[in-house]
Amino acid sequence: MIFDTHAHYDDERFDEDREELLLSLKDKGIGTVVNVGASVASTKKTFEIVKEHDFMYGAVGIHPEDVERLDESHMEWLKSLAADEKIVAIGEIGLDYYYDEPERDVQKKWFARQLDLAYELDMPIIIHSRDAAQDTLDIMKAEKAGEIGGVIHCFSYGTEMAREYLNMGFYLGIGGVVTFNNGRKLKEVVEYMPLDRIVLETDCPYLSPVPNRGKRNSSLNLPYVAEAISQIKGISPEEVIKITNQNARNLYRL
């Protein structure tokens, strides 16, 4: 069964058919899904959704684009949610310099604070890093993130940065981009990295793989990602699914 390590089924694009879609996943070979919080609102909704479905787990955290209005009360709130058995990680947290808002110092402050929270709770982390490679790595090293462990979600850097994270013991989240014609850099990373550090993810509703690129993504598209990885690694898609499922269970301590 396929393990989707990073989904956003709380997104409004699933409002019309969320339950129907989620209930169809098991029959289509999707065994487990981790839904990931990104804002205060989406973290609340994530908590509600995963409590309703036995095959789903959740992560709680605030994405860098949504940290501007945070205060310490939000950290206490995240801590209270994380105590629930259905919550398996702190995330997604990190840095995003693509739009450069909020300002970088604010992003860095709340990234470090949420890393501290994960350290305190002894929970794995889900890292979002976009156009912020060196700052992300520097903060993670300063905060001893290697002792926490986790996944670099939607990995988008080259093999040199992959080596840094693999040496720290992190998993790399591989999704639809590995099927893109312009995804050469990620294909090189998949070729370079060991199979026991790859986890499958959708980031749905975003980043649908070919042949559904540009459409709403869901866990149902993960066989395309497994097929692409299998071709790069020279093994069967079934083997990719089996190994990445176990990797995801190790990552989230399930």
Image (spheres, rainbow, N blue to C red):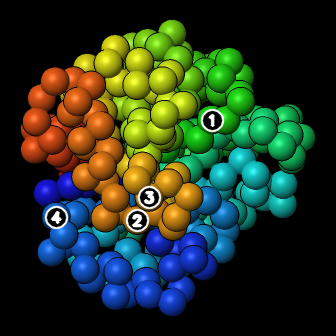
Q: x, y percentage for residue 51?
A: 36, 79
The residue labelled by disc 1 is 129
The total of numbered circles placed on residues is 4
Q: Secondary structure at mark 4?
A: loop
Q: Is residue 96 left or right of residue 54?
A: right
Q: Amino acid at mark 4?
A: Gly
Q: Secondary structure at mark 3?
A: loop
Q: Amino acid at mark 1?
A: Ser
Q: Is residue 239 left or right of residue 114?
A: left
Label 3: how many Cα within 10 Å (few below 14, some 14–19, many 20+): few
Label 4: how many Cα within 10 Å (few below 14, some 14–19, many 20+): some
Q: Is residue 21 left or right of residue 62?
A: left
**Image depth: mark 4 or mark 3 in front:** 3
Q: Are marks 1 and 3 in contact (CB under 8 Å)?
A: no
The residue labelled by disc 2 is 218
Q: Secondary structure at mark 2?
A: loop
Q: Nearer the viewer, residue 140 or 29?
A: 29
Label 2: how many Cα within 10 Å (few below 14, some 14–19, many 20+): many
The residue labelled by disc 3 is 212
Q: x, y percentage for residue 179?
A: 41, 39
> In the image, what residue occupies the spot 72% across and 47% down?
64
Sequence-first disc among 2 and 1: 1
**Image depth: mark 3 or mark 2 in front:** 3
Q: Nearer the viewer, residue 14 or 161?
A: 14
Height in image: 97 above or below 184?
A: below
Instruction: State the CA–CA distance, disc 3 to disc 2.
Output: 10 Å
Sequence-first disc among 4 and 3: 4
Q: Amino acid at mark 2?
A: Ser
